[in-house]
Amino acid sequence: MAIGGYFMFRKFLKSLPQADGKSTLDWQDYYIKKTIHLWTDEHKKLLNELVAPVPELFRDVAKQKIAGQIGQLLIEEKATELTQSYIIRGYILATPKRDHKWLIKTLKLKEIDIKPYQYLLDQA
């Protein structure tokens, strides 16, 4: 019960307007809506693999947060194509450091070089 209350309180805080008048959740939804057309089934599959260790109850929230971060990167960098690199960078930026172990393990299994993302992993 306490855990559920904690997560409800966090969601409430994220729904409060910031200085610009939009909440964190508003911005997240904005970034997703603006970039949803760039997502392919392959991209969605990779995101699903990365959030696999998240308990099922919270998995959709985690995917939304990560997809919002990826969308923000795409918009800020004026990208016209979603690549694996954006997904990995968005995951690193949107998740706590404790989740990065799973990312590294998954990337090694998929034989994806983590060196280009090491600077982000070190900053987290």
Image: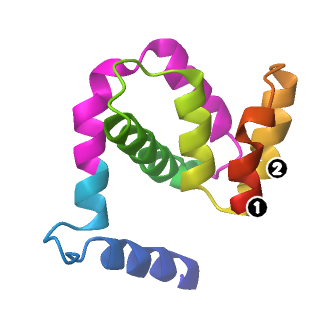
Q: Main secondary structure of the magenta part?
A: helix
Callout 1: SS: helix
Callout 2: SS: helix
- Residue for point 38% across, 34% down: 74
97 or 76, which is in the foreground? 76
- Residue for point 73% across, 34% down: 116
Q: Horizontal and vertical percent for residue 57?
A: 53, 54
Q: Amino acid at mark 2?
A: Lys
- The image shows residue 2, relative to residue 31, as above or below, that is below
66 or 61, which is in the foreground? 66
Residue 104 falls left or right of residue 70: right
- Residue for point 46% across, 82% down: 5
> Magenta part of the protein: which range?
29-55
**Quadrant holding the C terminus:** bottom right
Q: Horizontal and vertical percent for residue 95?
A: 60, 56
Image quarter of residue 26: bottom left
Residue 1 falls left or right of residue 117: left
Q: Horizontal and vertical percent for residue 3?
A: 57, 78
Is disc 1 in contact with disc 2, using a CB cutoff of under 8 Å? yes
23 or 49, which is in the foreground? 23
Q: Residues within 10 Å of mark 1 (few under 14, many from 20)?
A: few
